[in-house]
Amino acid sequence: MRDVWNTAELEVLDKAHLWHPFTPMRDWCELDHHPLVLVRGEGAMLEDSEGRRYLDGNSSIWTNIHGHAHPAINQAIRDQLDRVAHVSFLGTTNSPAIQLATKLTGFFSKNYLSRVFLSDDGSTAIEAAMKMAVQFWQNQGHPKKSRFVAFDRAYHGDTLGAASLGGIGAFHKRVAGHEFPVTRISAPAELDSLPGFHHGDVAAVVIEPLLQGAAGMRLWPTGMLRELRQKCDAAGVFLILDEVMTGFGRTGKMFACQHEEVVPDFLCLAKGLTGGYLPLAATLTTERVFSAFLGDVAEGKTFYYGHSYSGNPLGCAAALANLEIFEREETLQNLAPKIQILAHLLDGLRDIPFVHEIRHLGFVAGIEVRRPDGTEFPWADRIGANICLAARRHGLLTRPVLDTIVFMPPLCTTAEQLKTGTHAIRQAIGEVLGSA
């Protein structure tokens, strides 16, 4: 027997009590706005409280990997729930966390990233890496080495440290004056003349490898990541990679940095870590970094940072199941032909006059719309949001980044579902913008 939902009542209660992230709440609370109440998922599909089904075109905000209600992850959570749901990670440990750390460190040759710090989400994974980097240099006798270098249009999260790195004004201007010291650049070449980079006050460089997500799925030039690694090595500066979005198969490899055979000093993971099921994040780092925090308690080298749900057994059990599915179902091998199908389908959208650019890597795509003459629409017109709203009527659920339509479905999405998604985008653009 299926659940029966009172959608109207849920809408009223939502508008009366909830505050949604990244949402203009006045518009949300208008009487003529009817929020989509999602109640069920299966594979790459979601269902709302009225029984309508949609392709999950942005993987539930870039988190879902193998689809909703995957039996292996469901069972792993049930099995762990029968044992214990949560225990403190301060002063005790648990088997799922131990197994997960072992599994994650094994992805890199010679166990180079040998230490795993567990937290809650992508922002806290970045926060941990930043604080580790700063304290490492303090513990090594270099307290002035505390500045970070990030990239224009970057987004690394919303906790204060992570927000300091951000280069998108709408997200980060409200915390101006309260951040870590950060210098922003647009390309690695700028590091050559950057004061303090070469054995000066720069602690680390932070980047999303291969592409910037919240900037509109913007691709970095091939070889750029390897160049950045070389410059950081020469300058004695840490490299922090934010793979919160790009990790776990999104780019066609398990991690984006593997495309250029780059291993960072800190690797930040979240979103797809649990297959999109539960909040969990991991910050991987080296034995060199870890060793700098060892010493007598009186030396004050301990890393005093953590979260109540660090090492949560349910999350770790889900993450282990997620990684086992990659092996058992040969996810990456089966993804390769679907990436080619997606590329072909995206090429079919290029004849639309309003499609300015299509940026595609692996199973991630951003379709940017502009006027046919190349000029941008006024941001307040919310063209991208209106296109995504129209796409719902054609069975696609996704969100834009301004006027870039994100298409980033779960890795289990079939070729036929990819066709449905790209067709919905075409239809929605036509309905919102008409013909040229």
Image: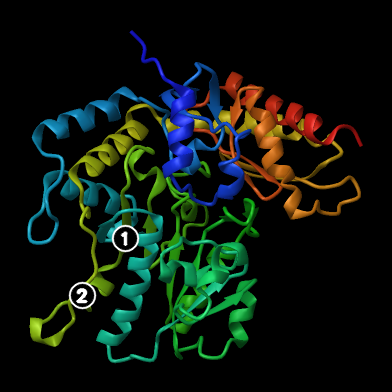
What residue is pinned by disc 1?
Answer: 284
Q: From the viewer's side, name the closer residue of 212 and 197.
A: 212
What residue is pinned by disc 2?
Answer: 291
Classify the position of the C terminus by image quarter: top right
* Number of marks present in the image shown: 2
The image's mark for residue 310 is none
Give the quadrant of residue 31: top right
Q: Is residue 249 visible?
A: no
- For marks 1 and 2 on the same chain, the one whose residue lies earlier in the sequence: 1
Could you tell me which residue is drawn at 42 percent across and 25 percent down? 39
> Secondary structure beneath disc 1?
strand
* Left or right side of 240 for 84: left
Could you tell me which residue is drawn at 91 percent across and 50 percent down? 373
Q: Is residue 112 above or below residue 391?
A: below
Q: Position of residue 3 (x, y in %)?
A: 36, 15
Could you tell me which residue is drawn at 57 percent across and 64 percent down? 154
Q: Position of residue 111 (x, y in %)?
A: 27, 58
* Left or right side of 381 for 262: left
Q: From the viewer's side, name the closer residue of 167 and 288.
A: 167
Residue type at mark 2: give it: Ser
Q: Is residue 51 above or below residue 256?
A: above
Q: Is residue 433 above or below residue 51?
A: below
Q: Position of residue 61 (x, y in %)?
A: 49, 42
**Contact, CB < 8 Å: mark 1 with mark 2?**
no
Mark 1–mark 2 distance (CA, rounded to whole Å): 14 Å
Could you tell me which residue is drawn at 75 percent across and 29 percent down? 426
Q: Position of residue 89 (x, y in %)?
A: 14, 56
Give the quadrant of residue 298: bottom left
> Secondary structure beneath disc 2?
helix
Residue type at mark 1: give it: Leu
